[in-house]
Image (cartoon, helix red, strand yellow):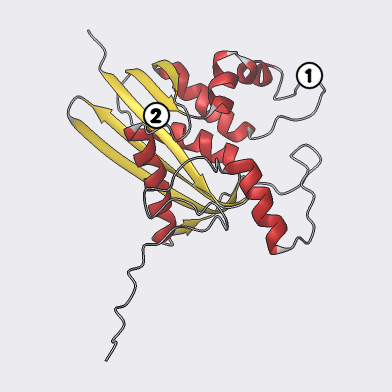
Amino acid sequence: MKLPEVDIYSDWWARPNPWAWGYGVILSYKWIKKEFNKWYKITTNNRMELTGVIIGLEKLKTKSIVNIYTDSQYTINWIEKWWAKKWKENNWLKSNKTKAINLDLWDKLLLLVDKHEVKFHWVKWHNWHIENERCDELATLALENMDLVEDIWFNWDTENQMKINIKVESKKEKINKVLNENVDKSIKITKEWQACRKCWTKVEKKIPKKINKK
C-alpha cells in the first residue's frame, strides 16, 4: 500500500528571548491545506521551533511520507545528525554529563519521526517562501488573538537547564540586542505584521487624516 505524502511547513515569531513566542504550521496534502497556530506567554525560540514541527506531525492520522519545511537548523541538525537520539539513549545526558535542554520536546519529536518516513528541508529565513511567510503570519495572528497559553515545561533557570542572566536593561539596550540577534535589517518591510527595524514592534499601516485648510 502506497503511503500518503504530506508536506508540513512550520515557523515561529517572537518577542525578546526568552519571552512570549508563537508558532504557525501548515499541513498540506494534495489540494487540502490546514493551518494551526498558538502563542505562549513565556518560552524560547528553540521550544517554538520544535513545537511547530511536533504539532504538524501529531495531526497525521496514518503513517505517511512527510516533507518538513522549516528554517530551524536547530531542529534539523539535532535530528538528522542523531544527536538527540544519542541523548535519549544516554538518559538525556550530554557528553559533559549535564541534562539536555528541551528534552520533553525532543522525546516527543523522536517518537513522531519514528512513526513516519520523514525528510527535513531547510528554508532560508524570510526568503519569500510562500508557505514559510504564511506560517510567520499565522504565528503573529495568534498573538493578536491574545489567547496565550502556558508552556508548563519551560524552566527559567535550574541546575540542568539554560542559565539566563536577568538584569535591568534600558529600552534602547533591549532594542539593540533584539535587532542584532533576530532582525535582518536589510529585509524590506512589505506587510503590516512584520517587525519595525528600529523598535521591533509590529508595523501598523496608518492613513494620515486630511487637513481642513479652511
Query: Disc 1 designates what residue?
Result: 95
The residue at 56%/49% (across/down) is: 151
Residue 58: x percent and y percent? 39, 32
**In this rendering, is residue 5 above or below 74?**
above
The residue at 38%/34% (across/down) is: 132
Tell me the crowding category of disc 2: few under 14, some 14 to 19, or many 20 or more residues within 10 angstroms, Cα based: many
Residue 192: x percent and y percent? 38, 55
Q: How many numbered marks have been drawn onto this rendered protein structure? A: 2
Query: Disc 2 designates what residue?
Result: 57
Task: Examine the image and state in which quarter residue 1 appears.
Answer: top left
Q: Secondary structure at mark 2?
A: helix
Measured Cα–Cα span from mark 2 to mark 1: 29 Å
Tell me the crowding category of disc 1: few under 14, some 14 to 19, or many 20 or more residues within 10 angstroms, Cα based: few
Residue 22: x percent and y percent? 48, 48
Q: Residue 184: give its label.
A: none
Tell me the kind of residue under disc 2: Leu
Tell me the kind of residue under disc 1: Ser
Q: Marks 2 and 1: CB-CB under 8 Å?
A: no
**In this rendering, is residue 9 above or below 111?**
below
Task: Examine the image and state in which quarter residue 153 appears.
Answer: top right
Viewer can see residue 114? yes
Residue found at the far bottom of this picture? 214
Viewer can see residue 17? no
Residue found at the far top of this picture? 1
Give whichever of discs 2 and 1 has the lower sequence position. Answer: 2
Residue 199: x percent and y percent? 57, 58
Q: Secondary structure at mark 1?
A: loop
The residue at 17%/29% (across/down) is: 31
Task: Examine the image and state in which quarter residue 145 appears.
Answer: bottom left
| Residue 134 shown left or right of residue 179 in the figure | left
The residue at 41%/18% (across/down) is: 115
Residue found at the far front of this picture? 213
